[in-house]
Amino acid sequence: MQGQNDTAIADGSGEGQTAGPATVDPAAPLLVFDSGVGGLSVLDEVRLLLPDAPVIYAADLAGLPYGNKTEAQIAARVSGLLGRMTERFAPRLVCIACNTASTIALASVREVLEVPIVGTVPAIKPAVIRTRSGVIGLLGTEATIRQAYVDRLEAEFAADKVLLRHAAPELVGAAEAKLRGNPVDPAVFVRAAQALRTMPGGEAIDTVVLACTHFPLVAEELAAAFGPGVEFVDGSAGIARRIAYLTAGQPWQRERADRAIFTRGGPEMDALAPALAARGLDQGGVF
Ligand code: DGL
């Protein structure tokens, strides 16, 4: 799977804003936020570049999935939660590791929070660079694929390409199940691939944008469903580079174990413990 290149950051594939003061508290964490486990695909890339960064991973499992909610619901929920989490945890930077939340609420969250915020938006530009057939597929949530933000990215970077969008909410559930060690029906992946393939021009797709952070977690299953000759592109590596850039020169000191916090508890959350432990995250309880 290919990440985006550096030049894609400034033009919409992994946005950010200026860093805070260099006198940042060395123990101040990065707050990585998603509706569920999807943001772990972003955290994996952040860990590679910033292994010493203290991290709080926050999953709004009480609000999952975001993809079937309205813009107003998502914007209110994300702004409210990030406001309260920022007060509680005093992060040096917030990463909204969710395409749905970012394409809808990034601007409004930036208006209300003082802390630097890096968002996640569909990696259309890197896909345009990679495609040879000129036909690109895009898999996202229902909410993401209808966003004007995505229309703007398409108009700016893919005007001379064909961009075929498909909402694949089933893949969110598949990634959530996989990380809990639950079985996932392979038909879910076949359906997503076929939906794109059977659109007009879809047989020529050679590049697929994974425009939901859950989807890289099931990239192998998707690759099997699409078959050879299709490359997947997502923004996670570029987002990690953006975070590294915005925090360059800052001191890091991990004073306690990194942790994952959820907006809902229960056995379903406990089942995530192995996937979280594999990423150096302790269960941090319910927020
Ligand atoms: N991980 C989220 C994204 O990147 C969406 C999952 C959901 O529907 O909540 O869009």
Image: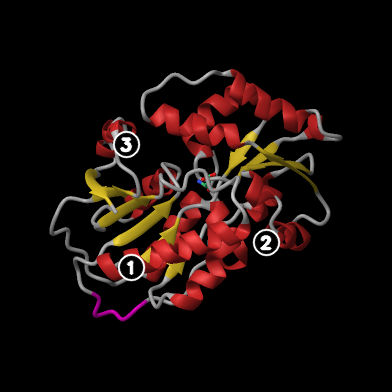
Specify few, some or many for label 2: CA neighbours under 10 Å numbering under 14, 14-19, or 20 or more.
Answer: some
Q: Is 22 in the magenta?
A: yes
The answer to whether the residues at label 1 and label 2 have Cβ atoms under 8 Å apart is: no
Q: Secondary structure at mark 1?
A: helix
Between 152 and 60, the one nearer to me in the picture: 60
Q: Residue furthest right?
A: 200
- Residue type marked 3: Met
Q: Which mark is residue 171?
A: none
What x and y, as percent, mark residue 31?
A: 34, 59
What is the quadrant of the N terminus in the image? top right
- Residue identified by numbered label 1: 86
Q: Is residue 204 above or below residue 224?
A: below
Q: Are marks 1 and 3 in contact (CB under 8 Å)?
A: no
Name the residue type under label 2: Tyr
Residue 149 - label: 2
Q: Alpha-carbon distance for marks 1 and 2?
A: 25 Å
Seen in the picture, residue 72 relative to 123 is either above or below; the reply is below
**Kind of element beneath mark 2:** helix
What count of labels does the image hold? 3
Magenta residues, start to end: 20-24
- Residue 259 horizontal side relative to residue 64, left or right: left
Q: Position of residue 78 (x, y in %)?
A: 47, 60
- The residue sitting at 59% across, 22% down in the picture is 224
Residue of label 3 = 269
User: Magenta stretch containing residue 103, yes or no?
Assistant: no
Question: Relative to residue 197, is residue 90 depicted above or below?
Answer: below
Side of 138 where 51 appears, left or right: left
